[in-house]
């Protein structure tokens, strides 16, 4: 889409971005349009169009590669998320089992600790009595 005022084979208001064959472009202020200035004295228009087609094909190929890469990375992230969900479920189950075994054997541990404390207290008591004599 060409915009700007045309005088004598030149669009006024164009930036000095000029190709070697007389074709220059610049973005229009405040819009998505590109202003195109063609200098008929320089270059062949067909060569410029062919060059532009090649660039468009290259850009399309790059866009397709980006799309396929994004899809493969999304698939990888989905697989990783499923793996993490499974790992989280496994950790949860193991924590539940560990808590169960601690509760079951925990009561006997408390009894053992209390008995050990009583035996130690008794031994210290008798040693203190014997040492006073």
Image (tube, rainbow, N blue to C red):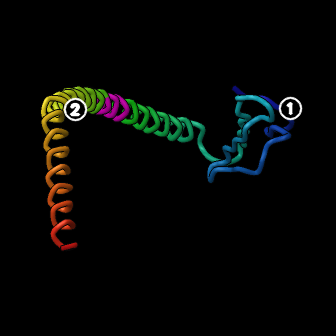
Front residue (pair 42, 105)? 105
Q: Is residue 127 left or right of residue 63?
A: left
Boundaries of the magenta span? 69-77
In the rendering, at what x and y percent does residue 54 appear? 45, 38
In the rendering, at what x and y percent does residue 26 appear? 72, 41
Q: Is residue 132 left or right of residue 16?
A: left
Q: Quadrant of the C terminus?
A: bottom left
Q: Is residue 71 magenta?
A: yes
Q: Is residue 105 above or below residue 43?
A: above
Front residue (pair 17, 39)? 17
Viewer can see residue 85: yes
Q: Secondary structure at mark 1?
A: strand
In the rendering, at what x and y percent does residue 36 appear? 71, 36
Q: Is residue 20 magenta?
A: no
Residue at the image point whose x is 19% and y is 39% from the top? 110
Residue at the image point whose x is 86% and y is 36% from the top? 7
Q: Which mark is residue 95?
A: 2
Circle 1 residues within 10 Å: few <14, some 14–19, many ≥20: few
Viewer can see residue 86: no
The answer to whether marks 2 and 1 mark residues whose Cβ atoms lie closer than 8 Å is no
The residue furthest front is 133
Main SS of the magenta segment?
helix
Q: Which mark is residue 5?
A: 1
Q: Which numbered disc flags the more N-terminal residue, 2 or 1? A: 1
Q: Nearer the viewer, mark 2 or mark 1?
A: 2
Q: Is residue 1 left or right of residue 97?
A: right
Residue at the image point whose x is 79% and y is 38% from the top? 9
Q: Is residue 32 above or below residue 12?
A: above
Q: Quadrant of the N terminus?
A: top right
Q: Secondary structure at mark 2?
A: helix
């Amino acid at each position: 889409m060409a915009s700007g005022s045309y005088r004598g084979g030149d669009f006024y208001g164009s930036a000095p971005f000029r190709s070697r064959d007389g074709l220059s472009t610049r973005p229009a202020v405040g819009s998505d349009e590109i202003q195109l200035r063609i200098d008929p004295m320089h270059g062949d228009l067909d060569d410029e169009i062919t060059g532009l087609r090649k660039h468009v094909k290259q850009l399309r190929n790059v866009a397709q590669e980006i799309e396929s890469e994004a899809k493969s990375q999304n698939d990888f992230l989905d697989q990783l998320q499923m793996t993490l969900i499974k790992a989280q479920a496994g950790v949860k189950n193991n924590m539940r089992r560990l808590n169960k075994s601690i509760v079951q054997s925990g009561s006997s541990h408390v009894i053992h600790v209390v008995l050990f404390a009583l035996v130690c207290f008794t031994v210290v008591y008798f040693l203190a009595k014997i040492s006073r004599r």
